Each structure stands twice: as C-alpha cells, then as structure tokens.
Amino acid sequence: MKKINVGLIGFGTIGTGVVKLLKKNRNEIMRKTGINVQLKKIADLDVTSDRGIHLEKGILTRNVNQIIKDPEIDLVVELIGGVTKARELIIKALYNGKHVVTANKALLSLHSRELFKIADKNNRMIGFEASVCGGIPIIKVIRESLVANKIKKIMGIVNGTTNFILSQMEEKDLDFNKALQLAQKKGFAEANPDLDISGEDAAHKLQILASYAFSTDIPLKKIYFEGIEKIDIQDIRYIQELGYKIKLLAIVKMDKHNRIECRVHPTIIPKDYLLASVKDEYNAVFIEGDASGGQIFYGKGAGSLPTASAVVGDIIDIAKSCEESRGASYSEIFDLHSKIVIKKFADFSCRYYLRFHTKDQPGVLAQIGKILGNHRISLTSVIQKETGQKVVPIVMLTHLAKEDDIQRAIRSIRKLKIVKNPVKIIRIENSD
Ligand code: HSE
C-alpha cells in the first residue's frame, strides 16, 4: 500500500477537522484509494487545549521545523491562515521537497504566482481546493470536469458569513449586528469578521477562481469589492416586493472581446434563480462553459469537517499523482501568453437599483429623471409610496447601464437640494 507522510501546521478549527476525518474514515480512505495517509506531526502554538481527539505521544509540537525539516514528511498541510508567516513556511516546505496543501485564500490571492513557480522549480505540487468554498470541490470541477470548456462566466455565493447575515435579515427581520453575532457564534466568520462583511474574503476567493478559470494572474487590486454593511432592512423589503433577493455575489465574466470583469458586491437577483434559494451559511457557484452551458455547485463553504473534506481530498490527489506530477502546476494556472484584458470598474455594466430620499414636492422625479437621461440611463420601474412624511424614499430600477454613467449621474443627483442622504446603489444581475 502506498504511504504518504503528512505534517500538519495549524491545529485550529480546520486542522482539528482534518485529524478527525483522517481518523474516522481511515479504513474507508485506504480501501477506496489504496493510500495510507500517515499523520506524522502536528505543529501549533497551543499544545494544551483539548480538541476532543486522542493523539499518540510525540505527535504534537510547537516547533514547525520538526515538520519542515523532517526528511520523512512528504506533504505539509498549512492551516495557520494569515499571509506573512504562512508564505514563509510554504516556501521553506517546497524548497525542502514537500508537497503543500493549503486552505489559505488570502495568501494565494496575493502570492500564487510566486508559490506555484517555486513548486514547479522543485517539482512539487500545491493543493488548494479548500481555499475556495470549503467542501465544494469547485477547483477540481474547473481543473478536470470542465477542462474542455472555455469558461464564460462564474457567479457565486462564496462567503457563508454574509449569506447567513443576509438570509437572517431577510427571513427573521434581524438587524445586521444581531445576525453577525449569530454567524460568529456558529464559527464560520473569519477571525476578523471585517474580511467577510467588507467583501474582501469573497474577493480573495474570486481572485483564485477567476485566475484559475481564465489561466491568468488577476491582481487582487483589480477586483472591485463592496460589502454588505450598508444594506438595510428597508432595501431588503423593497427588493422582496419587487420579486428579487439580495446576495453577496462574486462575479467574473468574459465579453466577446476577451475582456473580463471581476467584482464582488451585494447583488439583486430574481427570486426564482437557483442562487436566490441558497440560504444561510451555504455557498453555491454557477459556472458557464462554452460547451457545458450553465451548472450550479452547492454545499457547505466553511466549517471544520466540510473544509477538512477538501484538504484530505487534495492530500489523496497529490499522493495518487506524485509519479505523474499531475497536480496543478504553474503553467496550468498561468498562461504566459494570455491576451485577456481586465476591465476597469468604470467600464462595467449591469442593471441598477437606486434609492433616493427626497423632498415630496413637484418636479422631483423630473429633475432626477432628467439627470439619469442625460447620462444614458433608462428606467424600468419607479416606486414612491404615500407616507405622509416630508422626505420620502424613491426606488428606481434601471435598464443596463455603464458604471461610469451611474457614478456620474449619482454625483449630480446628490448635489440637488431636494435629495437627502443616503443614496443607495445596488447592482442587479438577471441572467444566471
Ligand atoms: N469566513 C468564510 C466564510 C469562511 O464565511 O465563508 C470560509 O472561507
């Protein structure tokens, strides 16, 4: 039986899941794959907490060098998160001839080109399935099942925390902070939940997905991201009334001139879309290939065992393909001759939801409508309700418009004396 010796760095939520899974399904894994995954060492700064697992003596250490420098260890699993230290450890592990499996999306979104180059140079592999959407095997789908396709579009709910918050706000009428506290209690928010709320965690995942799907290195700074912190219950009610739902979506699509746009933002989608029915902490990714058409992948995008499932899958994949060197390599990920252009934010286009607060007096709609018209923005619906108040909300949905036109129009509208704060802009996608 083939054996692979593994060293695990980081014995937190996912690390604990990996050890539990390897113990629980040991026989199953060996029977199905013919591979004996031997966990040789675990390194963590905390060697005293009870994780509810029995470990043989001597396995747990505070010293990462006992893994990185152990010539018997074939593969290092990095689960410490963060960028600087994790990068250093992975580079050392690769130079020391070890394969690497990581769930570290922040690190990969910044340094994948460097890391994959080093891996290639040392004839080692990096598995990163767990970095995007936890338990959903989306990287493998792009790499293997859809390899014959030119990818046209990916649209996904890739952050469980924000999906949970929006679902709770929508269904239980909870305010933002209550819903966030609940998400943190359930353990799927990042250590710093700002990364979730601001859309940055989703941008990290989109960087990885999009770079891989389009074989090009998309600089993280070219990905526009906006979080859910400004979504309030009023918007959610209007959106529901109009027959839509709101989700934080990570979107990448290619136009016919080979230009791609990459963006993460709260997105309004029709409520009968499959993505609209993805609730709570669940993730889902829609991928459209030129041959396959559209497909949706759904599941748990975070959490101890779902993410461990992706980590262990990568370990086995690497163990199986060691001789053939078949894992993701630098040339597979980055097409050095890629002619893909990444669109600027100003050139994006989609439909928009706009909410203004205005004085209730003659000529208000005409003034706003005129500015929108001057910027080539056409409306599909307008709602103003009788409230009896002096300042009233007006909600407008637009036809397809250019981001630049919207931003310019909104700047002019904000200057009108009749318009009060806040002015809300939420983007709409209506084809999945
Ligand atoms: N904080 C992330 C989420 C965890 O909420 O989806 C998984 O990457």
Image (spheres, rainbow, N blue to C red):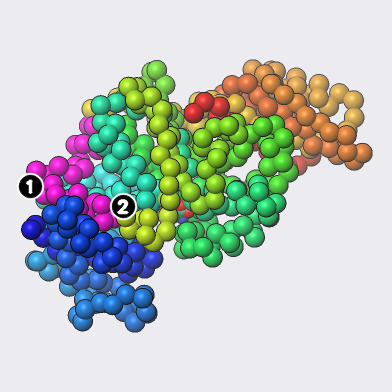
**Is residue 412 shown left or right of residue 222?**
right
Question: Of residues 411 and 60, which is closer to you in this image?
Answer: 60
Name the image quarter holding residue 259: top left
Identified by mark 1, the residue type is Glu
For disc 1, the marked residue is 323
**Which mark, residue 428?**
none
- In percent of width and height, residue 145 lies at 27, 34
Q: Residue at x 9, y 66 (%)?
A: 72
- In percent of width and height, residue 29 lies at 21, 57
Q: In the rendered structure, does residue 264 fall within the stretch colored magenta?
A: no
The correct choice, above or below, for 91 with respect to 52 in the image is above
Q: Residue at x 64, y 59 (%)?
A: 177
- The numbered mark, 1 or 2, whose residue comes first in the sequence reads 2
**Which mark, residue 310?**
2
Q: In the rendered structure, does residue 327 fall within the stretch colored magenta?
A: yes
Q: Residue at x 58, y 32 (%)?
A: 272
Question: Of residues 398 and 372, which is closer to you in this image?
Answer: 398
Look at the image and tell me whether residue 363 can be seen: yes
Within the displayed image, which quadrant is ligand 1 positioned in? bottom left
